[in-house]
Image: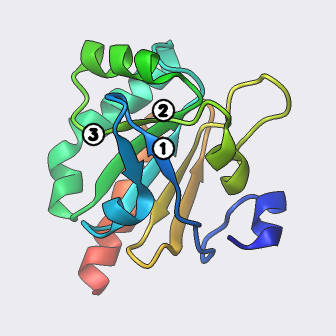
Amino acid sequence: MLGAATLRGVQVGDIVADFELDDEDGAPRRLSDELAKGPVVLFFYPKAMTAGCTKESCRFRDLASEFAAVGAQRLGISADSVDRQKKFSDKHTFDYPLLSDPDRTVARELGVKRAGPLPNKRTTFVIDTDRRVLAVIASETNMDKHADVALAVLSQRATST
């Protein structure tokens, strides 16, 4: 990862370092393995099973066919435990992995970790197969924006390749 990116937050054009975290079933998921299947939409949410995070995560679920049409993988990520991620996923029948980053290591690397015990910033990264960031979407209040903008970026990518 670019050293300066950690201080200012990852931006469009930066390369995201590979990482591995456990998903809601406790299985390890590596970013590079997901990118081998196509671009990744990595969305950070503050806390599983809260109103805003549920709305945002359900939007990603509800647009499953649209993301599949552009060959994209969706990955949710928060500091919640594997068990809490599992409950969240089961309750809302999410069809994509939820990653547990309890130490907020990946959040820190991507520049979305807040100081102290506060939850991570609500931020989405659209990452191309070469690990280059295509878009950074940040909004704490517009829950649909993350999935909608990510899909627009990926649709444009699909028509320009």
- C-alpha gap between disc 3 and disc 2: 18 Å
The residue that label 3 is drawn on is: 96
Q: Is residue 86 left or right of residue 49?
A: left
Task: Of the two numbered discs 3 and 2 on the same chain, state the one appearing first in sequence.
Answer: 3
- The residue at the point 34 percent across, 76 percent down is 157
Residue drawn at x 44%, y 79% as measured from the top left: 130
Which of the labelled discs sits on residue 74, or is there none? none
Quadrant of the snapshot with the C terminus:
bottom left
Query: Disc 1 or 2, which lies upstream in sequence?
Result: 1
| Secondary element at image label 3 | loop
Q: What amino acid type is highlighted by mark number 3?
A: Tyr
Q: Secondary structure at mark 1?
A: strand
Vertical comparison of 161 with 30: above or below: below
Q: Amino acid at mark 1?
A: Leu
Picture residue at 24% right of the left edge, 66% below the top? 37
Please state which of the two labelled residues, at mark 3 or mark 1, is closer to the viewer: 1
